[in-house]
Amino acid sequence: MFSYIIYALVWLVSFLPFRVLYLIADGMYYILYYVVRYRRKIVAENLEHSFPEKTSRERKEIEKKFYRHLSDFFVEFFKPWHMSQKEIQKRCVFKHADVLQHYYDQGRQVIGVMGHYGNWEWMTSYALLLNPAVSFYTLYKPLHNRVLDKMMVRIRSRFGAKPIPRNDVLRVIVRDLQAKQIFLAAFIGDQTPNIYNLNFWTTFLNQDTPVLLGTEKIATKFNIPVISLSTRKIRRGYYEVDFVSLCENPRDLKPGELTELHTRYLEQQIRRQPEYWLWSHRRWKHHRKA
């Protein structure tokens, strides 16, 4: 029953105009930062280790900006449920889509890799720009609660994207390759591997960091071109996304090279505007064995 109440509440809240939602976000920022102090210790430690060259005052400024963005992200995530195509396309603008079209014209599938940066959920609106013959898959981890999982899938598929459980992605890719179905499959490249997948380590934001190899393994196995996204938050509720080609033929690269490429690219974005990355994520909970 509680799940259905949340479902109904989110459905109703998503009708609210942005000016009201951002008033809610302002209150949420105060509660998260000053009252609940949501993961503030984790955020502060992550920033200190990532930016040792900055002063404590500079890191504190980034910290507060992050919590403001996190509050905005929360209300923005649910809004697409009742958001028009015209409005989402005005608020989330994609540039250089010809980078992808270049591969589609060749009949090739594409893998896109990005991080928890900006508003990654609004990236699903790219499906509105696609020819119906091209599928756009977004990977996600299903929730244990069926009602809330259904809600998340409905929001994420609002503009034509097709959410795929991450354990099913290889099966779907193989199926589409055999059928010569063109697709873009979007991977998140900065998730923390579980303890059984600590197979690749690199330096990321000044720290020894394990990175999942799933993107590289699939791209290399099938020689699927890999692109990344450069996201900028123009102002509150407005984003600009630029497509950038990382590798046209992954099989030409050495093991680990593609993973380094997309990790370095994300790192550049974070250093440019650090407040828009998900600092509350426990990215460095694992440590490499000596």
Image (cartoon, rainbow, N blue to C red):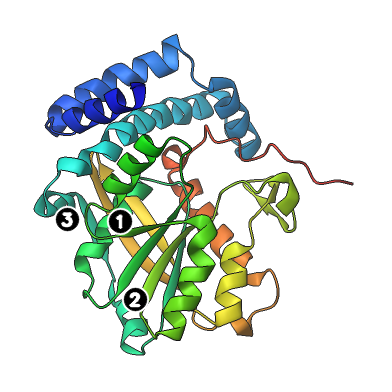
Which residue position holds label 1?
124
Secondary structure under the numbered disc 3 in the rendered image:
helix
Question: Of callouts 1 and 3, which one flags the residue occurring earlier in the amino acid sequence?
Answer: 3
Residue at left offset 33%, top offset 32%: 74
Where in the figure is residue 206, as x and y percent of width and height?
67, 45
Residue at left offset 46%, top offset 40%: 143
Q: Is residue 261 above or below residue 56?
A: below
Q: Is residue 123 above or below residue 10?
A: below
Which residue position holds label 3?
89
Where in the figure is residue 285, as x and y percent of width and height?
69, 36
Mark in front: 1 vs 3? 1
Q: CA distance from mark 3 to mark 2?
A: 18 Å
Mark in front: 1 vs 2? 1
Q: Please name the amino acid that badge 3 sits on.
A: Gln
Q: Residues within 10 Å of mark 2 (few under 14, many from 20)?
A: many
Residue situated in front as seen by the camera: 28 or 149? 149
Q: Residues within 10 Å of mark 1 (few under 14, many from 20)?
A: many
Residue 31: mark in rendering = none
Which residue position holds label 2?
100
Q: Is residue 78 left or right of residue 56?
A: left
Q: Please name the amino acid that badge 1 sits on.
A: Thr
Secondary structure under the numbered disc 1 in the rendered image:
helix
Q: Is residue 284 left or right of residue 266?
A: right
Q: CA distance from mark 1 to mark 3?
A: 11 Å
